[in-house]
Amino acid sequence: MVLRLWIGLAFFLSGVVLWTDLDTRTQLLSTVTGAGVLASGSGDYLTGSIEMLAGLLLILGLGARFAAALLVTVAMWFHAQQPGFGIDSTWLLLTGWFVIAGVGPISFDRLFGLGLPESAVVFAKPIARFCSLLSVWIVPLYLLGFRILVSWAFFSNGFGNIKGAANTVYVFLPDYWVAVEVPGAIASAITSIELVFPAFVAIGLATRFSAIPLLLIALLPELLSLEGTTHLQWAAMLALLMTGGPGRLSADHLVWKFLRKRYPELAGKAPFPLNELPHVIVVGAGFGGIGAVRALRHAPCRITLIDRHNYHLFQPLLYQVATGGLSPADIATPIRSMVRNQANVTVLMGRVQEIDKEADAVVLENGRRIDFDYLILATGARHGYFGRDDDWEKLAPGLKKIDDATELRSRLLLAFENAESTTNATLRRDYLSFVIVGGGPTGVELAGAMAELARHGLSGEFRNIDPASARIILVQAGDRVLPTFPESLSRKALRSLERLGVEVRLNSMVEDIDDDGVVIAGERVASKTVFWAAGVIASPAGKWLAAATDPAGRVIVEADLSIPGRPNVFAVGDTAASSSWKGKPAPGLASAAKQGGEHAARVVHAMLEERSPPGPFVYEHAGSLATIGRKAAVVDLNVLRFSGAPAWWFWGLVHVFFLAGTRNRIAVMIQWAWAYITYRGGMRLITGGSR
Ligand SMILES: Cc1cc2nc3c(=O)[nH]c(=O)nc-3n(C[C@H](O)[C@H](O)[C@H](O)COP(=O)(O)OP(=O)(O)OC[C@H]3O[C@@H](n4cnc5c(N)ncnc54)[C@H](O)[C@@H]3O)c2cc1C
């Protein structure tokens, strides 16, 4: 991929310069690619455009074979037109590699590779077939050519060095020899390497290792910062052989074939059946559970991952589903697809109801019992209503699951519909009053997104009401919003909320909630829509295990995240209380859950291999982020704090990066871009049976 980016960037910049100033083209290529050799004659806009477009496609890995073929053609055409400008054949060979072999896994071509051949696109199937034939038949020949070329270049260089002065070696290659003065011993070592190792590379014997010393020699001019020595493309060819191997026409291939026949386990076939391995059960496919499963990828065990849903949910963006900015599928990823390539994992959809501690078994809702050797509980948390769950949960739903988000979205949109259709002014006012309880990140983000929807997203769509007149009231028991952030950022968040017209009530407790409103610090506020973002309570894992819990219901775990007295049972993430953050409990954040899951997996892995366990779990806090609205966010990265538009961009990038699945990342970016330009969210559907 690095090679692809490098070549794509070189051509892209070459195209840019061709558009702007031909004279600097050679120089620019020198700095970018280490070779000022692609420059060719007088520029024209057509060639510049082709280079830019094809370079970009190569970088993206989209139609990369065709882009690379176009670039090779353009470079050769230039050369034919103006022979005075040299084209380095190594550049052409490297670019040609992508024509023959295609691109690697991190590319759009790989993403579309499965579906496109069977699509209705004309000639897609024969083209795909032709490309795969190229990969099968021409790649080995191409690699053989690479090997012979590289070997010959080094060997002839070494041969030349024999005749040179004792303390001088010529690096690097025939066209670009550079004399370097080195101690005599080093000169003869370099010469010997150049004489011996090319033979191994040429026949493809221990190629990946033989290429290493040659690569170092190829990099010598760069390492020594010698003027005018820019031959990274030779190093790139060697790196390609080191990472991809020498291909089928090589001694390595024959040796490997023989070994695989003799020792089938080398071919990925387990020497013993998977079901004889110790059984690890992971309950919950949230951040903690997925983190644990992935960290057990190479552990000698079979894993059963149990979740009551068939998807992993990215909770940080739930509020955008609740306010119509994203659709549920954008932030949820099927669990099976996430672990598709991990052969030691079986996914089971089911709700765990209890744990049989005596028999080491989990019991599912349908009565099925599953035995385990090790158990990792990552069942998260749910809303807590400070003991008023029975009365308040129906009246003020919270935001934890997809169903919660679609319920909130329905209630929010229904309130506007009801306000539009009623002729009673008081009722209309009540429908247009929204109360959010809780001024932590969820409450702040929800309030900001609701205010943006009311002020901008619905404008011009109603005839009897002005959605912008909606009151949005955020109630916070403490003296500032975002209490886990530094005070300065809390103040900025408060100002951003106020700019959006959100009424923030600090130091105010919600004392009662009913169908017609809430009582806030003794004052009645009429509202038909109340949302809860105030408290969470851990899953019942503590009850299942009859283990000690903290006031939020989180299981109090040992330093290695195991349950006291149960070294083979672990709790991680929102369902565990561990004093792993400088003596304080790890926060209820996705990163803490992920790190916890990975740590528990490391402990299990060490036990499976009878190694000494890793030290205690130490939570590394990378920072906290919250967004309030367009161009308004706060970021606390411990060493750096910022807010406003840069924080908003940072927040967006981080969330897209951590979303699971490429489809979701692309979908979210498209939705955001659309909403950013138009101020309209497209997911404003009232679904389900909301009141
Ligand atoms: C609205 C909202 C916004 C948030 N924003 C952020 C943020 O911006 N940044 C951040 O870092 N964190 C944020 N968080 C917190 C973060 O999402 C959680 O800390 C994190 O998801 C915890 O991971 P977990 O693996 O412990 O639990 P979860 O991710 O909640 O996963 C628990 C899993 O267990 C499954 N499960 C539960 N009970 C059972 C059962 N009985 N049987 C089978 N399966 C079960 C659930 O279906 C779920 O898949 C937010 C949370 C919410 C709700």
Image (cartoon, rainbow, N blue to C red):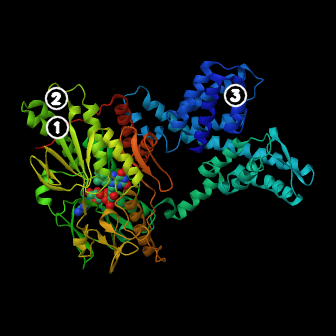
**Tags 1 and 3 in contact by the CB under 8 Å rule?**
no
> For the residue carrying disc 2, how many other residues have a C-alpha within 10 Å: few (<14), some (14-19), or many (20+)?
some
- Asked if residue 579 lies left or right of residue 534, the reply is right
Q: Quadrant of the N terminus?
A: top right
Asked where in the image residue 121 lies, by quadrant, the reply is: top left
Mark before the other along the chain sequence, 1 or 3: 3
Amino acid type of disc 1? Answer: Leu
Q: Quadrant of the C terminus?
A: top left
Q: Residue at x 22, y 54 (%)?
A: 508
Query: Does residue 133 appear left or right of residue 119 in this picture?
Result: right
Q: CA distance from mark 2 to mark 3?
A: 60 Å
Using a 10 Å C-alpha cutoff, classify the residue at mark 3 as few (fewer than 14 neighbours), some (14 to 19) or many (20 or more): many
Q: Which quadrant contains ligand 1?
A: bottom left
Q: Which residue is mark 3?
A: 25
Kind of residue at badge 3: Arg
Q: Circle 1 sits in a helix, a strand or a loop, which is it?
A: loop
Q: Which residue is mark 2?
A: 465
Q: Is the residue 461 above or below the residue 168 in the image?
A: above
Spatial CA span between label 2 and label 1: 9 Å
Residue 653 image point, x, y percent = 44, 44
Q: Which circle's residue, 2 or 3, is located before the other in the chain?
A: 3
